[in-house]
Amino acid sequence: MARLVLQRAVSAEWMDSLFEEHRQRQYTRELLFSTVVGLMSVVALGLRPSLHAAAKAAEVGTSLAALYDKGNRMEPGLVRALVRGSAQRMEPVVEPLRTGQKPWAEGYRVRVIDGNHLPASEKRLKPLREFRGAALPGHSLVVYAPEQGLVVDMVPCEDAHAQERTLVAAALEHAQQGDLWIADRNFSTTKIVFGLEERQAAFIIREHGRTPSPTEVGKRREVGRVETGVVVEQAVQVEDDSGRLLTLRRIELQLDEPTEEGEPLIRLLTNAPAEKLSAEQVACLYRKRWSIEGMFQSLESALHSEVRTLGQPRAALLAFGTAVVAYNILAVIQAAVEAAHPQAKAKGIEISPFFISIEVKATYGGMMIAVADEIWAAFDKQTPLQLSRLLLLIAQHAQPKRLRKRPRGPKKKTKKGYVDGRAARKHVSTARVLASGRIDSTS
């Protein structure tokens, strides 16, 4: 299943044509764009520990220096085009697998937007070797379609200190009528609110304490209750720099228990009309925004999305973008397994992308040795609907119990506080502690 979806999402011919369409300064001399992405996807899936190891196993007919140079110079626009284009190729495959699912918001195409900062890389680059702090290779803005389970857009940025908000304009280029964009308070600005309104897209954005500073124009009224608290609604107005006014609904959620930051109240701004989305629905939809955090966790746990040996920002962003494509492939497989085993969902069995990735890693290499390339080529002419049906047929042989999520209980919050350095460096024998049932203060 992984191989079939992979060749649909990122076929070599399509990727090389994508390179010619979107490249700016790069050109093909020794290495094809498809070769670099293919090797990076092997690393992202965890089949090889590094780009070096992947290149050695594949016996690429060029030098390692040329390979790394190609990755280090990969233009961010190409990475974005790879993620967007591959998602568009997978959408008609996953849609038949998601039929029958209850929509998040009737009549809307939901998009959740959030930023993701890459972790510090190893300081292999000469200018960084004497620096004691963290070297950050960049970040990106990610647009997630939760109903399809796919990342549909990614705006990469080489400057790790650049504001997430500076990337929003690029992401909003594709906002359109019928969309419902959900975002946290980092994106609560007048420019973003008016930008979405101009594109006739609906939004639910958590209000920031300072911006867009709406003016109250209606009375606050309690309208109902949801699982986490009481819902209050009020009409407000926002004004931009040119003096234009925009009337919005402010939805307040008075929480029964405060957030982790100790906040008892969440304020949301929306331009969705009340006849389409009630205040209670708005509050519930924002709560489901955390699905994008689950996607980021899957990228980290199920895939090798953060290659810390890649210090060059463009190479690190290429690795992350390739991991996003790999995540989308796992999402299509997950959709096929869930569609093939509806009784598992009825019993409360949730499929885990992590365990799907484990299954793929365990057998993929051997399969590629055992099955000749010409056999895979026979599936290239399939329509998206034919591929969906084939995935469903194969997924019937999967065992949902082996792929189910194993959620752990909530962690107890304990304040560690400050301790003396000597206490922090102290060590004990675990076996002795377990045998005695206590820690000897003298040890």
Image (cartoon, helix red, strand yellow):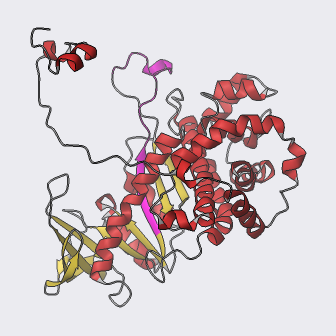
- Estimate the x, y position of residue 59 in percent, counting from the top left: 79, 26
Image quadrant in which you'd find residue 285: bottom left
Above or below, 182 against 64 in this view is below
Find the magenta span and give its range.
Answer: 111-132
Query: 168 or 98: nearer the eye?
Result: 98
Q: Residue at x 35, y 83 (%)?
A: 277
Above or below, 350 against 197 in this view is above
- Estimate the x, y position of residue 273 in percent, counting from the top left: 35, 87
Magenta span includes 117: yes
Image quadrant in which you'd find residue 279: bottom left
- Estimate the x, y position of residue 276 in percent, counting from the top left: 39, 87
Magenta span includes 72: no
Q: Is residue 96 visible?
A: yes
Q: Residue at x 49, y 18 (%)?
A: 126
Image quadrant in which you'd find residue 182: bottom left
Q: Where is the C terminus found, in terms of image quarters?
A: top left
Q: Residue furthest top?
A: 443
Q: Is residue 36 visible?
A: no
Q: Is residue 314 left or right of residue 159?
A: right
- Estimate the x, y position of residue 297 in percent, counting from the top left: 43, 46
Query: 173 or 96: nearer the eye?
Result: 96
Q: Is residue 273 left or right of residue 146?
A: left
